[in-house]
Amino acid sequence: MSEPEREVERNVLGGPLQPCSTDPLTGVYRTGVCSSGPEDVGSHTVCAVVSAEFLDLQRRLGNDLSSPRPEYGFPGLRPGDRWCVVAARWMQAYQAGAASGVVLAATNARALEVVPLEALRQHAVDVPDDLSGLD
């Protein structure tokens, strides 16, 4: 399935949506970008840097992201991989204390329909440390 033509999508910071991962190749359209459209029923819009804790929680909830699923072009994830995850699944992990890191510049603004920006910022891996107010 190819990505439909559309306006430039925005990230949660208001800028152009940046790539999330090309190895493994992520995104609902497998373009490496957390693009979203009518076909993206789950809203795969959060660019997560998955952790072992996040993967374990997802597996326990019935969303096994570690096992390869070649029929869907899914390689299976290892800690440290970047992947466009379903916003509601990321929020579920956040509420359980197992949220993964987030690349804000590569997280689609549509994620904000499900996840508050502050929650994403708390787990951002692409912002300078000084934004936290600490020296």
Image (cartoon, rainbow, N blue to C red):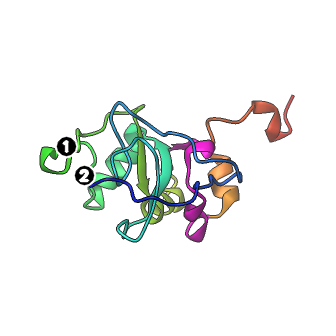
SS at circle 1: loop
The answer to which of 1 and 107 lies nearer the viewer is: 1
Question: In the image, residue 103 lies at what x, y percent?
Answer: 57, 41
The answer to which of 20 and 76 lies nearer the viewer is: 20
| Mark 2 vs mark 1, CA separation in Å | 6 Å
- Badge 2: how crowded within 10 Å, few (<14), some, or many (20+)? some
- Which residue occupies 48% across, 59% down? 96
CB within 8 Å, label 2 to label 1: yes
- Position above or below: 95 against 33: below
Q: Which mark is residue 67?
A: 1
Report the number of discs.
2
Range drawn in magenta: 100-115
Three-letter code, disc 2: Asp
The answer to which of 65 and 18 lies nearer the viewer is: 18
- Which residue occupies 80% across, 40% down? 132
- Which residue occupies 58% across, 47% down? 17
Q: Quadrant of the C terminus?
A: top right
- Which residue occupies 45% across, 58% down? 5
Question: In the image, residue 124 lies at what x, y percent?
Answer: 63, 42
Specify the farthest residue to the front.
5
* 110 within the magenta span: yes
Q: Which mark is residue 113?
A: none
Question: In the image, residue 7 lies at what x, y percent?
Answer: 57, 59
Three-letter code, disc 1: Ser
